Amino acid sequence: MLIVKAMQSMLNDAALTEDIRSVLSQQLSRNDWRLSEDPHDRTESTIWFRSCLQLLAYNRAERLYGLGRLQAKQFAPRPEFSRNGSNTLVVPFRFPQRTYGILIRHAAQTWEQVFYEICRAVIHLLDPNALVDQPRVCVIEEAVALKFAERCYEQYVSKIPGCETLILHVEETRAAYQNALRIVRKVPDSVLKTVRERAGAFHKVTDTAELRRALSLHLAEEEIAALLAPFPEQPPAS
């Protein structure tokens, strides 16, 4: 399948030990696995591919924006699908207990759509809002999630002939999302990493003189204020 090619390219760019890289490469190349066209299927290969995609996307997110807060034992082993949810979320899972994972929106019906949703969600998985008592969603976190997912899709999926063109979920076409994405595209990932490190997490970002200085070479004053603000209409907490 075309999505396998995208994941193989992603694996080639991943920062992994040679042992892990070898195992993943062998699994991706298995001829006896028949990956279903439907990512919702519960076959062994389909479940494994969702898990592998989460691992590769998270690895890339950490390389760009710094290490995540979760320990290995706190990760749910694979992304799951919501029964009827309209948004992809990072949530605490009941099993295994005390783990956090990705709940993919039910309407994601193709592997290309699942690829995008997982890439977007891993930014929230770096610092799950579920770990704090009063979840806060900031413009910059939503914007970075969109930017990261868009870039991954362009780099690994769009270049493959036959893969579907990225079509944004209706929620992401709202002006608040698109304005945030327009602004954050101007900021190098190295600077966004610095912002996250100084704030402690993207969802902890507040409008401070220190963060304004970090962004001032790339954005106008009004753009900085918009990026450091709480999200104007709170989406469901990730």
Image: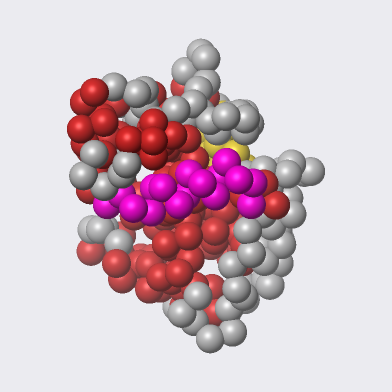
Judge left or right: residue 62 versus residue 48: left
Quarter of the C terminus within the rendering: top right
Q: Quadrant of residue 36?
A: bottom right
Q: Where is 163 relative to 209, above or below?
A: below
Q: Where is 28 relative to 117, above or below?
A: below
54 magenta-colored:
no
Q: Residue at x 70, y 52 (%)?
A: 170
Q: Residue furthest top?
A: 133
Q: Residue furthest right?
A: 84
Residue 177 lies, in percent from the top left, at 56, 45
Q: Residue at x 79, y 43 (%)?
A: 84
In this picture, which residue range is highlighted in magenta? 173-189
Is 101 or 183 nearer to us in this picture? 183
Q: Where is 72 relative to 22, above or below?
A: above
Q: Quadrant of residue 212?
A: top left
Judge left or right: residue 160 versus residue 155: right
Q: Main secondary structure of the magenta part?
A: helix
